[in-house]
Amino acid sequence: MLKRTFDIVFSMTGLLIVWPILAAIAFMIKARDRGPVFYRGVRVGRNRKPFRIFKFRTMVVDADRIGGPSTADDDTRITVIGRFLRRYKLDELPQLINVLKGEMSFVGPRPEVAHEVETYSESELRVLSVRPGITDWASLTFHNEGEILKGSPDPHLAYRERIRPEKLRLALKYVDESTLTTDIKIIIQTLATLINTRKRSAGI
């Protein structure tokens, strides 16, 4: 109950603070690409309940029909503005709406598509016992996931071999050790990672 209260209060606060940024990004996407502003892919949530995630669209229209579900930094489907949004995780900001609706939490295992969840073992399905989140331990460890997959002839195969096992281990670690203190620690480390990414990009 405390975690849900935290999510409601801070998602509402966050939306009130960042709405000018959301509006500016939406305008840039529409002006440059003229396609949908949001990507609303279906993800599997808590207790296997499907929901549509809110993300700013960073790839060409119908990208899921012309490529796989895993995206490397050199994926040709990524738009010019999409590369910028992905670098600073700005495409994730609209997920504050999912948090407010109760479909996601600030902190929790990242939500996956249905066909990926279907490959989970019985023990791995425990990650669906909590709300998926915007960030978690795995998001911090693999904050440069696109860079890791760069140059792979089959990015999704590379994802399953190089990232998925550890990602699921960290997700289960979160499920087993979840506390509000842990959530706050992950949020602080996520903000620090984003700041460091910006400094590296600026050459500071």
Image (tube, rainbow, N blue to C red):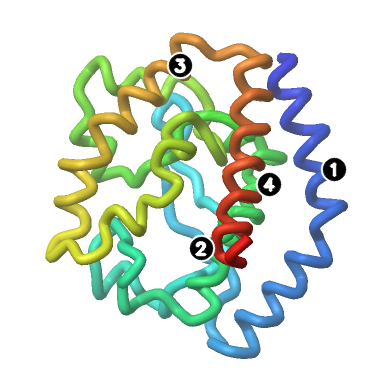
Q: Earlier in the sequence, mark 3 or mark 2?
A: 2
What residue is shown with label 4?
A: 96
Residue named by callout 2: 86
Amino acid identity at mark 3: Val
Spatial CA span between label 1 and label 4: 10 Å
Quarter occupied by the N terminus: top right
Q: Residue 192 at x, y = what percent?
A: 64, 41
Of helix, strand and loop, which one carries label 2?
helix
Distance of label 3 from label 2 (alpha carbons) = 27 Å
Q: Indicate which label's residue lies in the foreground, 3 or 2.
A: 2
Mark 1 lies on residue: 13
Q: CA distance from mark 2 to mark 1?
A: 23 Å
Helix or strand or loop: what does disc 1 sit on? helix
Q: Residue at x 45, y 46 (%)?
A: 143
- Residues at badges 3 and 4 in contact (C-beta under 8 Å)? no
Above/below status of 40 relative to 12: below
- Determine whether, in the image, residue 198 is placed left or right of residue 132: right
Depth check: 23 or 196 in front? 196
- In the rendered image, which residue does mark 3 sit on? 175
Question: Counting residues from the N terminus, which is met first, the one under dot 2 or under dot 4?
Answer: 2
Between discs 3 and 4, the one toward the N terminus = 4
Where's residue 92, x and y in %? 58, 54
Q: Spatial distance from mark 2 to mark 4, Cα to Cα?
A: 16 Å
In the image, residue 111 sits, relative to residue 172, either above or below, namely: below
**Residue 38's disc number:** none
Q: Position of residue 69 (x, y in %)?
A: 29, 58
- Mark 2 neighbour class, 10 Å CA radius: few under 14, some 14 to 19, many 20 or more: some
